Image (cartoon, grey):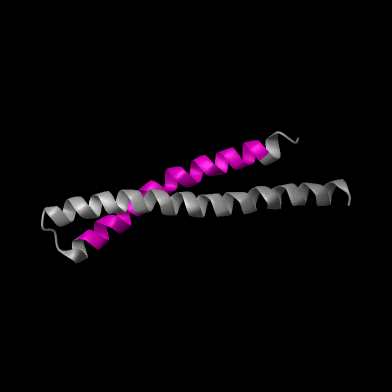
Amino acid sequence: MNAAEMRQVKFFKAWAIFLVMSTVGSAAVGFLVGAAVGALMGALGTPVRNMQAVASLIGIATMLPVSFLIYRWSVKQFILKQL
């Protein structure tokens, strides 16, 4: 395997780990935040349709920072250390 192929393997490894960790991390954070918001809105008597809309927006808002932090860690861990 030459240097260019090794570099591609490193990028693929970083991407694959980012993909798995980002999916799991975002799902976990989304579940926790969604459960808390859903419980609060349910206790306030909010209609289910409104709860779904708010939970979707909050899910996207919480997914972005989690995804960014995991991306930054993945690049730093698997690409920058090896250059």
Residue at image position (51%, 50%) is 22
Task: Mark yes or no: residue 26 visible.
Answer: yes
Depth check, front residue: 43 or 75: 43
Chain part drawn in magenta: 51-77
Say left or right for 78 vs 33. right
Give above or below for 83 relative to 3: above
Predominant SS of the magenta segment? helix
Say left or right for 19 vs 56. right
Is residue 67 rendered magenta in the image?
Answer: yes
Residue 69 in percent (x, y) is at 50, 40
From the image, which quarter does the C terminus lie in? Answer: top right
Say left or right for 59 vs 8. left
Residue found at the far left of this picture? 45
Residue 46 in percent (x, y) is at 13, 59
Is residue 54 rendered magenta in the image?
Answer: yes
Residue at image position (43%, 47%) is 64
Residue at image position (61%, 42%) is 74
Residue 4 in percent (x, y) is at 83, 49
Residue found at the far bottom of this picture? 49
Residue 77 in percent (x, y) is at 65, 37
Task: Mark yes or no: residue 60 visible.
Answer: no
Residue at image position (28%, 56%) is 55
Task: State the count of labels.
Answer: 0
Say left or right for 10 vs 52. right
Depth check, front residue: 70 or 38: 38
